[in-house]
Image (cartoon, rainbow, N blue to C red):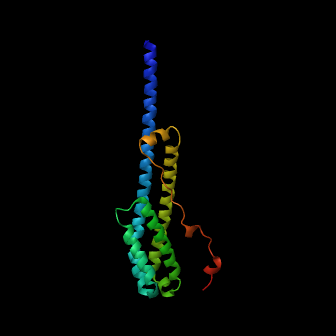
């Protein structure tokens, strides 16, 4: 009888250790996802800080692009609101990326603007921030994939249900980014 009790206690302790280990692992992965999203937020903030200077510089030269500049300014205002869900933030970020790409194409029509040192510096800063955003998205996607795998595989899936953990969405390319580039249009002046 004594050995049976010891056996049961050992089994219970092993199960408890597995439970604690899986719980801690899931918590760690959830926090890694939050941290990675925070890194994206920081880089997006850097981009949002550049937008007013970029808009002001372009406005000096490109009077015909008022609608596009207004759209970018409005999107920036939406993006810096604190009550946005991560999904809303991603959606607005994609819209800003598309609008900024459109602005960079429109700038081609203004040679004086393209030659402005202030604009060149802003464009260089924006390119650097965009590169950092892309790196932060890759890190986020890796953390999300690791998290999703952990909560979908045994034994994590059993505990994830009790912890009310849900899978997260990875960043994907927008439809515009996925489309084929029309090289012919790029070389027309």
Q: Residue 55 appears at what percent x and percent y?
A: 41, 79
Q: Nearer the viewer, residue 153 or 125?
A: 153
Question: Which residue occupies the extreme left position in the image?
Answer: 82
Question: Which residue sits at x=59%, y=67%?
Answer: 178
Q: Nearer the viewer, residue 102 or 110?
A: 102
Question: Which residue sits at x=44%, y=75%?
Answer: 122
Question: Which residue occupies the extreme right position in the image?
Answer: 184
Q: Is 8 rendered above or below residue 88? A: above
Question: Which residue occupies the extreme top position in the image?
Answer: 1
Q: Nearer the viewer, residue 71 or 35?
A: 71
Question: Which residue sits at x=44%, y=34%?
Answer: 19
Q: Is 78 rendered above or below residue 18? A: below
* Residue 12 visible to the viewer: yes
Which quarter of the figure is the N terminus placed in?
Answer: top left
Q: Residue 52 appears at what percent x and percent y?
A: 38, 76
* Residue 25 visible to the viewer: no
Q: Residue 171 appears at what percent x and percent y?
A: 51, 59
Q: Is 88 rendered above or below residue 121? A: above
Which quarter of the figure is the C terminus placed in?
Answer: bottom right
Question: Where is residue 44, by image quadrant?
Answer: bottom left
């Amino acid at each position: 009888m004594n050995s049976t009790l010891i056996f049961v206690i050992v089994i219970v302790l092993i199960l408890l250790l597995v439970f604690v280990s899986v719980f801690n692992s899931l918590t760690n992965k959830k926090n890694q996802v939050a941290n990675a999203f925070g890194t994206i937020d920081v880089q997006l903030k850097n981009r949002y800080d550049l937008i007013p200077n970029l808009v002001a510089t372009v406005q000096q030269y490109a009077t015909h692009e008022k609608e596009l500049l207004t759209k970018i300014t409005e999107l920036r205002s939406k993006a810096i609101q604190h009550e946005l869900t991560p999904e809303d933030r991603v959606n607005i970020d994609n819209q800003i990326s598309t609008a900024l790409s459109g602005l960079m194409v429109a700038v081609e029509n203004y040679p004086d603007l393209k030659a402005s040192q202030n604009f060149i510096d802003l464009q260089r800063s924006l390119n650097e921030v965009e590169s950092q955003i892309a790196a932060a998205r890759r890190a986020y996607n890796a953390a999300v994939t690791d998290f999703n795998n952990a909560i979908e595989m045994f034994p994590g899936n059993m505990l994830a249900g009790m912890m009310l953990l849900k899978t997260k969405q990875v960043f994907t390319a927008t439809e515009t980014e996925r489309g084929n580039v029309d090289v012919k249009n790029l070389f027309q002046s």
